[in-house]
Image (cartoon, rainbow, N blue to C red):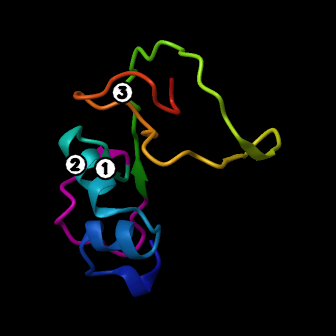
Amino acid sequence: MEARDAGRKIQDILQHRLHLSRIFIRELKAHAGIFRNNAPVFANQRAEPGDILSIRWQNAQQDIEPRPLPLSIVYEDPDILVLDKQWGILSHPVKTSPEATIAN
């Protein structure tokens, strides 16, 4: 932890210095995924000089069954896939529409 972060709330450091979204920070808090010096910590606690902050996050595994869907691929390399997604097709399954999404 840098001296300039001393006294700041841990959630503020995660949001403003590491550019984590508030929703993601909320998810981390819900699953005890925020650590200071390898010990679980509440995100509203304040950082001290020399602290080492870390996060541990496990993405919930979802059973997404593949479904054929025509895709318009604009660009593809080993790390990135850019699609021209049709209007009305969801990116990820939701409870009301679990199939026919880009993730499937």
Percent position of residue 6, x then y: 33, 81
On the image, which quarter does residue 96 sit in? Answer: top left
Query: Which amino acid type corresponds to the residue marked 3 in the rendered image?
Result: Ala
Q: Secondary structure at mark 3?
A: loop
Residue at 29% across / 73% down in the picture? 12
Taking the image as shown, residue 62 lies to the left or right of residue 65, namely: left
On the image, which quarter does residue 95 sit in? Answer: top left
Residue at 30% across / 28% down in the picture? 97
Percent position of residue 56, x then y: 40, 41
Residues drawn in magenta: 38-52
Which secondary structure type mostly characterizes the magenta part of the structure?
loop
Percent position of residue 44, x then y: 16, 66
The residue pinned by badge 1 equals 34
- The circle drawn on residue 29 is 2
- Check whether the beta carbons of the residues at disc 1 and disc 2 lie within 8 A of each other: yes
Number of the front mark, 3 or 1 = 3
Query: Which amino acid type corresponds to the residue marked 2 in the rendered image?
Result: Lys
Label 1, residues with CA under 10 Å away: few <14, some 14-19, many ≥20: many
The residue pinned by badge 3 equals 60
Viewer-closest of 25 and 10: 25
